Amino acid sequence: LLQEPELAFLDRRGRILLMGTPGDPQQFRYELFYFYFSISVNFPVLCFCIVHVMHRLKVNSQMAKSQQTQILTKKMFEVFFLQLNGSPVNHLIPLSSLMASMLIDMRSWTDGVIAVLKLILLV
């Protein structure tokens, strides 16, 4: 890998950390396993916390006396509902795609396909 011009330039500047050729992360594969394990542990906790807050807001809105409090509680409920529905889209899909791109050799993909994927994940 250090024979390639881009990496040879970096090697001349000092130390360089290599994770293997594209599609073969070598030892970094274990880091990916830890990453997926942390997602599988943390994501349900995130979802549980959001669902718990939504439940508490529903209970509190039933006890609220003023109409203004009920309106604000309903708006907060809608915000947490959107967070719960958006968390897979905004959390799981981009991070999983990032890690999958380290395991897949994308050198044979056209620039157009990569550009579209990058745009989709950034948005």
Image (tube, helix red, strand yellow):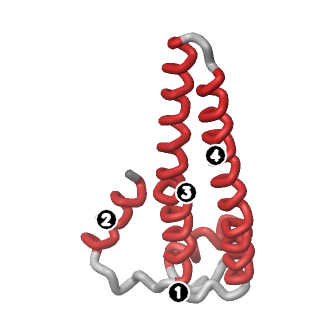
Q: Amino acid at mark 1?
A: Gly
Which residue is at the front of the view, 6 or 47? 47
x and y percent of residue 87 in the render? Answer: 53, 53
Q: Amino acid at mark 3?
A: His
Q: Which residue is mark 2?
A: 115
Sequence-first tag of 1 and 3 = 1
Sequence-first tag of 2 and 1 = 1
Q: Which residue is mark 3?
A: 91
Choose mark 3 or mark 2, whichever is in front. 3
Which residue is at the front of the view, 101 or 9? 101
The residues bearing labels 3 and 2 have C-alpha atoms spaced at a distance of 21 Å
Choose mark 1 or mark 3, whichever is in front. 3
Residues tagged 2 and 1 counted as in contact (Cβ below 8 A): no
The circle on residue 44 is none
- What residue appears at the point 47 percent right and 43 percent down from the top-left corner? 82
Sequence-first tag of 3 and 4 = 4
Residues tagged 4 and 2 counted as in contact (Cβ below 8 A): no
Q: Horizontal placement of 68 versus 48: left or right?
A: left
Q: Amino acid at mark 2?
A: Ala
Sequence-first tag of 4 and 1 = 1
Choose mark 3 or mark 4, whichever is in front. 4
The residues bearing labels 2 and 1 have C-alpha atoms spaced at a distance of 18 Å
Q: Which residue is mark 4?
A: 50
Residue at the left extreme, as displayed: 112
